[in-house]
Amino acid sequence: MRNAVFAACLATIAAVPATALAGGDAEAGKSKSAACSICHGADGKAQIPFYPNLAGQNELYLLNALKAYRNGERKGSYASMMTPNVAALNDQDLADLAAYYHSLK
């Protein structure tokens, strides 16, 4: 059983594209975060309760969420606000933002 779980974990990791595992540059992300801070706060902690806090969030989760908003794949309640804000950002910009918010406590 233990070997089957280990093999499943390895298979999952192997299926993740290498670009998804590559971290962004938190310092670069900080310089790109001005527009984000309007809703999510300068320190990644939203001042308005219904906006999510980003500080300390899982980097890969943030990256995948940002890509999904940009690509029109995420249709949740925030999509109408998020999609236009990330539409012009490239993969590196998104990785940098994800790294920055992950680095905050």
Image (spheres, rainbow, N blue to C red):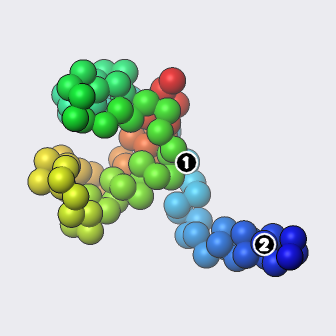
Disc 2 versus disc 1: distance between alpha carbons?
26 Å
For residue 53, side relative to residue 48 (left or right) = right
User: Which residue corresponds to the image point at 22% horizontal and 58% vertical from the top-left?
Assistant: 76
Neighbour tally class for label 1: few under 14, some 14-19, many 20 plus, Cα within 10 Å:
some
Q: Position of residue 103 (x, y in %)?
A: 52, 31
User: Which residue corresponds to the image point at 37% horizontal and 21% vertical from the top-left?
Assistant: 43
Does the CB distance between marks 2 and 1 fall below 8 Å? no
Q: Secondary structure at mark 1?
A: loop
* Quarter location, residue 15: bottom right
| Quadrant the N terminus occupies | bottom right
Q: In front here: 41 or 92?
A: 41
For residue 36, side relative to residue 26 (left or right) = left
User: Which residue corresponds to the image point at 24% horizontal and 21% vertical from the top-left?
Assistant: 47
Circle 2 is placed at which residue position?
Answer: 5
Q: Secondary structure at mark 2?
A: helix
Q: Position of residue 100 (x, y in %)?
A: 45, 34
Q: Amino acid at mark 2?
A: Val
For residue 7, side relative to residue 61 (left or right) = right
Neighbour tally class for label 2: few under 14, some 14-19, many 20 plus, Cα within 10 Å:
few
Circle 1 is placed at which residue position?
Answer: 23
